[in-house]
Each structure stands twice: as structure tokens, then as C-alpha cells.
Image (cartoon, rainbow, N blue to C red):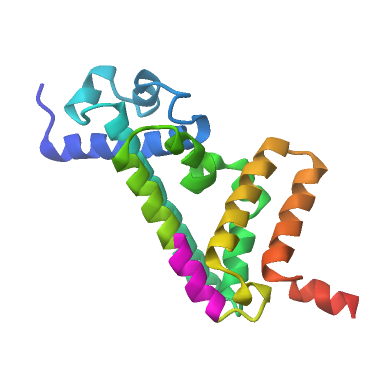
Amino acid sequence: MRVSREKAQANREQIIETAARLLREHGFDGIGVADIMKAAGLTHGGFYRNFASKDDLAVKASEHAMADTIALLKNGLAQQQPQDPLRAVIESYVSSAHRDDPGSGCILPALAADAARRDDPALRAVFITAIQYYLDQIAKLSSASPGAAGSRHPAAILSEMVGAVILSRVIANDPLAESLVAAVVADIAGPSPGRASDEE
């Protein structure tokens, strides 16, 4: 039985969405095509009607994951309307919630090390685009930030943010993870306004 064009497109999007989550959770080599297709509720045979290879899917899934992250950041800022949007981004990114949910988080702490080991220019291009996006946004937000981050280079801020998430995932639920997250947020954005007022 032939699948309609609309259903075929929906299946393709389902595969990409599922792969975007599972690859962030398990890494590019930590899960196979069969498991991705099973999680998407589709047969293994349908994979090659949609993608040339697993590497092709990895690129599409990484693009999808990054688009999701950008949308979450934009929506979060729009809803919060914070006085210090850079602090809001940092507190959302360097957080226990992001640490504990890699499947819905940013591709940089989840997959950048994997991408660096793969000889795939298309995949690396996705990560370069993601890095450049963050650098541009951090530069824009830093210029309007009343906190300490305004004087720091965006590359240093991004590297500290990504590194903090990676290290906190290694530490997991140990109290050290919470102190690491808090220390990095304070280092980048300065003490929280509430804490500053409490100390006075």
C-alpha cells in the first residue's frame, strides 16, 4: 500500500525528531538506525526511503535539534521579558534542568565532541553554524547586560557555558554539580540581584 506524500513527509519528520532526541541522549555511535526507527514507531525498511545513510540523518537531526534550542531560547526570553536577558539565557542554559535532560537540550554539550571525531564536513557545518549563532546572540545580549558579562568575550562565555553543562553531567546528582552550575552562572553574570541585596 502506497503512503501518501503527506504521510511520507510526516514519517520523515518523525524520524528526524526522534533521532534528534536519541542522538543527544546516546551520541552518534551510541544508538543504531533500527532503534531510532523503532522509537519513531516505524519499520527499519522505511529508513532508506528517507535518508541516504545514518550520517545523513545525523546532519538533519542536528539541524532540527539546534532549531529547537533556538526556538526555546527565543520563546523563553519573550515570555520572561527579563531586565537582564543575558543572565536569563545563562541561568537557563547552565542549569540542573538542562543538565538532566540532554535529549531536549543543546547539541553542543551533547554532541560536539562526537562531531569533532567524525570526518563529515556537513555535520561540522551544523555545529559551526550553532556556535556562530550563540556567539552573535551573546555579543548582542552582553552589550545590554548590566552584569559582569558585558566586558567578556562571547567565545569565553560560550565555552564556559558549554563546559559547565558537560562537567555537571559527568558529576550528575552529586552536590558538586549544583555548586559548579552556581559558580559558573555567578562567574559569567555576577551574583544574582537577590543574593546581592541579601548580602548588603
In which quadrant of the rendered image does the N terminus lie?
top left
Q: Nearer the viewer, residue 165 or 114?
A: 114
Q: Residue at x 52, y 40 (%)?
A: 110
| x and y percentages locating residue 58 in the rendered image | 34, 35
Kindly tell me whether residue 60 is visible in this rendering. Answer: no
Q: How many marks?
A: 0
Magenta-span inclusion, residue 44: no
| x and y percentages locating residue 75 in the rendered image | 46, 65
Q: Is residue 59 above or below residue 155?
A: above
- Determine the image quadrant of residue 147: bottom right
Q: Residue at x 73, y 38 (%)?
A: 171
Q: Is residue 42 left or right of residue 160?
A: left
| x and y percentages locating residue 149 in the rendered image | 63, 72
Q: Residue at x 53, y 61 (%)?
A: 155
Q: Is residue 28 above or below residue 109?
A: above
Range shown magenta: 134-143
Q: Nearer the viewer, residue 147 or 45?
A: 147
| x and y percentages locating residue 29 in the rendered image | 44, 25
Magenta-span inclusion, residue 136: yes
